[in-house]
Image: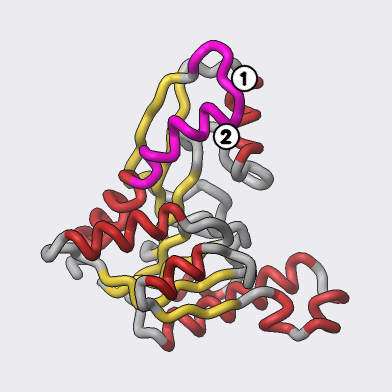
Amino acid sequence: MKIAVLVSGGGTNLQALIDYEKSHADCPYHIQIVIADTKKAFALERALNAGIETKIVSPFAVLGAEKAKTSSKEEKRLAVSDAALAAAKNAGCDAIVLAGWLTVLSGTIISEYSNRIVNLHPALLPKFGGVGMWGHNVHEAVLAAHEKESGCTVHLVDAGCDTGKILVQKKVPVLDGDTPETLYARIAPEEHKAMVEGVCLLAKELNL
């Protein structure tokens, strides 16, 4: 299964996918391209170090500086989504993996890759999902709700926000005195495992 990995940040989950592919001869996926919605994503360095093609589809890269400044959030979201779709299709990708990708996808990419887009969410969906629930916002919400456990979810992407079919979940305890940072530190290793498992499951489901 040829995949495009979409990134916005440090790329630790991308690295988990790269490492698994390199170390497993029977790996069911191959990373064709890494696509970032910001040129500042360190994940791009990881991709280049692994010899993987990269593409930047930030609003500035896609729309140009002037138009990016005057466009609405929805217009920028659609432009980035369409550019990511074009890059994935041009690279011959069978599926798309969102590994710390912060732009909410919209437009034809959702239908063109229906049931072929997976996302990693840093909580146990359906709890703590939806608009605004990303990064430390999620961990702060979990702690504020006095949850006994948290974790991460790999799910299929649909037209909603964090609403698609769940493929993999990993759980960790929430401990007394936890901060968003300490809770994330406990979840992060589970994210890496879940990301690889979820992508391998998708390859199995698609029979690729």
Q: Residue furthest top?
A: 176
Say which residue label 1 marks: 145
**On-image quarter of the C terminus:** bottom left
Which x, y percent locates residue 156?
41, 54
Secondary structure mostly taken by the magenta-highlighted segment of the chain: helix
Amino acid under disc 1: Ala
Q: Residue furthest left?
A: 26
Q: Is residue 184 magenta?
A: yes
Q: Residue at x 57, y 51 (%)?
A: 161
Which x, y percent locates residue 34?
45, 72
Q: Secondary structure at mark 2?
A: loop
Q: Residue furthest bottom?
A: 90
Which x, y percent locates residue 165?
39, 48
Mark 2 near mark 1, Cβ–Cβ under 8 Å?
yes
Q: Secondary structure at mark 1?
A: loop
Q: Is residue 148 magenta?
A: no
Q: Which residues are magenta?
A: 175-192
Locate residue 93: give its quadrant. bottom left
Q: Is residue 194 left or right of residue 159?
A: left
Regarding residue 110, the answer to whether it shows in the image is no
Which x, y percent locates residue 76?
72, 72
